[in-house]
Amino acid sequence: MTSADAWSATPTTAVLILADGTVIEGQGLGATGQSVGEVCFNTAMTGYEEILTDPSYAGQIITFTFPHIGNVGTNEEDIETVNMASSSGVRGAIFKADITDPSNYRATKHLDAWLKARGIVGLCGVDTRALTALIRERGLANAVIAHAPDGVFDMDALKQAAQAWPGLDGMDLAKDVTTAQSFSWDETPWAWGNGYGRRERESFNVVALDYGIKRNILRLLADTGCKVTVLPATASAQDVLSHNPDGVFLSNGPGDPAATGEYAVETIRKVVDEGLPVFGICLGHQMLAIALGAKTTKMHQGHHGANHPVFDRTTGKVEITSMNHGFAVDAQTLPGTLEETHVSLFDGSNCGIRLKDRPVFSVQYHPEASPGPRDSHYLFRRFANLMRERKGIASEAER
């Protein structure tokens, strides 16, 4: 596979080498050096900064299928990672076209400079359609992305590095992106002309377990009246219950849910046994399913984008969602105590569950958006209503 014709005369300063030996050449941007990870593709047309700072992408090299990435620059408000010390864990970024100068009133930095500052290796001038087709055909691939301004690469060594990397299967990455200590959160969603706000009411006390949580999840929890305390991924059930929560949130995150579940599942199971309302997203959804008796599996190409249709069996509605996952709950392994509430209309994979006899539910996709549609914001109100019911307060109608 070769780069686009328009780039054929431009010297190669960056390469992507897949574990099977496939070499993709292009022009480097962002940080110099090399990084190894799993190559995936994202079909979203907007929100590249949110995508690149989503901790769920730790260990991955993101191929953007939309050709024009970087046009609106970057800013300090759209970053989604909470643990700034860990960056986000993204291993690299691949673009069709070179990055143009930013044209947006919110921009504070060029994407190229932003990538350099965050240590993310970039590659452009690549036929991303062909790379996407390759991933769809062969599956998610381990690879090395390398950027050298002089164009000198040790191709054999890079290939060996790609082949030696063990991949995400069996890898616990939540420990790399989680917060090191507990903290409180009261920031609410961004509003035109006002920016981010602060929680005005305090109706519920929620503990959020951070497996790689996004800021907009915390903002939407705060916006529903939740006093939010965030705890590290390794927190015990005793740690959670010591805060006397009205509900517990299980966050998104990267890596293999079975690997992270080796220490997280026991905590989740004990919290569920307490009868507390529990809401999980993404990795939290997968580990909740494991805790309740189901199994997870590695997907062929995963789901990454902001245009995924999901059917909500509880309402009969179809919602367009943001997704980012390479593992999924195996619906065939759900025990009789669990009900499948949401399914992907792309491939029929599981996208949601709930316990039949307790206030516990979760979804595979990202209802907080950022980026992506807001169709699924109602799930945060659903969580709040479960806490209201447990406290004996009349529930608000879901909208």
Image: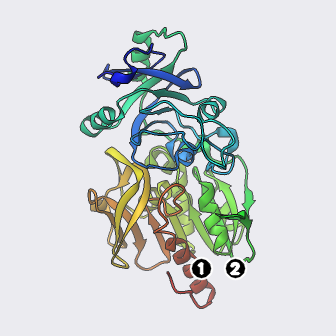
Q: Residues within 10 Å of mark 2 (few under 14, many from 20)?
A: some
- Picture layout, residue 293 above or below residue 199: above
Q: Quadrant of the N terminus?
A: top left
Q: Residue at x 44, y 15 (%)?
A: 10
| Closer mark to the observer between disc 2 and disc 1 | 2
Mark 2: amino acid: Ser
Q: Secondary structure at mark 2?
A: loop
- Picture layout, residue 111 above or below residue 161: below
Closer to the camera in the image, 82 or 53: 53
Q: Which colour scheme appears in the figure?
A: rainbow
Q: Are marks 2 and 1 in contact (CB under 8 Å)?
A: yes
Closer to the camera in the image, 349 or 310: 310
Mark 1: amino acid: Met
Residue matched to label 2? 203
Q: Earlier in the sequence, mark 2 or mark 1?
A: 2
Q: Which quadrant would residue 185 be assigned to in this image? A: bottom right
Residue matched to label 1? 387
- Residue 390: image location, x then y, percent: 59, 84
- Picture layout, residue 23 above or below residue 342: above
- Residue 331: image location, x then y, percent: 30, 61
Q: Is residue 64 visible?
A: yes
Q: Secondary structure at mark 1?
A: helix
Please count the marks in the image.
2
Q: Residue at x 54, y 75 (%)?
A: 383
- Residue 211: image location, x then y, percent: 57, 51
